[in-house]
Image (cartoon, rainbow, N blue to C red):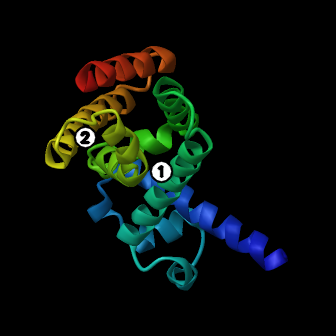
Amino acid sequence: MISDARVRYTRMVIKNSFMELLKDHPVNKITVKDVCEMAEINRATFYKHYTDCFDLLSKIEDEMICELEQLVQVSQHKNITDLFQKMFNKIKESGTSYLTIVSDHGDRTFSNRILKTFYEQAFPSFENQLPNVSKQKKEWLYYFSANGCSGILTHWISSGMKADTKEISEFIAELLRKLTA
């Protein structure tokens, strides 16, 4: 039990230190040594958990996506506006983490990765709304709308998440309704 708490604490300190460094430096300029100095741990401890800083960034992103996936699974039968609003609220809750990751120093493609992750869950619902459209055209429409949503998400995050989550969710839902009408 104690070791589990220590492991969680160590990972948290490593992640927090890395995210602080990522605010000011591109990921390819952050060294394991930098992270270890800020986290006040030795390199062997870092390497017990991560292979390098890119692995660390990937694992942080995976955790964020996993949290959003859980949110989608819980909200699966609710309307799309509620789903988007919950997703935006969850992102806003995590605040600077998402902002840091989509910054010029982090992973500018993270928003796309979020939406691609939901493809398998969202596409069947999307597909059912368009019964008379070929599968190929449905895929094109899905990716067109997903990339548009990704652009809105990226802009919202990078502009400080100031827009009201309900307003932006309703806007996206309305665009999607018009697109699939």
Circle 2 residues within 10 Å: few <14, some 14–19, many ≥20: many
Residue behind mark 2: 142
- Vertical order, 143 against 29 (above or below): above
Identify whether 149 is placed above or below 2.
above
Observer-nearest of 120 and 101: 120
Q: Give the residue type at disc 1.
A: Glu
Q: Earlier in the sequence, mark 2 or mark 1?
A: 1
Q: Quadrant of the C terminus?
A: top left
Q: On the rendered structure, is 6 left or right of 46?
A: right
- Binning the other alpha carbons within 10 Å of mark 1 as few (below 14), some (14 to 19) or many (20 upward) gives some
Residue type at tag 2: Tyr
x then y, percent, for residue 101 = 38, 48
Q: Please identify, in this view, whether the residue under mark 2 or under mark 1 is nearer the observer.
A: 2
Figure quadrant of residue 134? top left
Residue beneath label 1, please? 20
From what the image shows, is residue 109 above or below residue 18?
Answer: above
Q: Secondary structure at mark 2?
A: helix
Q: Quadrant of residue 180?
A: top left
Which residue shows up at 51% across the image and 32% down it?
83
Q: Residue 27 or 56: which is nearer the viewer?
A: 56
Residue drawn where x is 58% and y is 50% of the image: 70
Q: Secondary structure at mark 1?
A: helix
Residue sticking out furthest to the front: 132
Which of the pair 71/33 is nearer the observer?
71
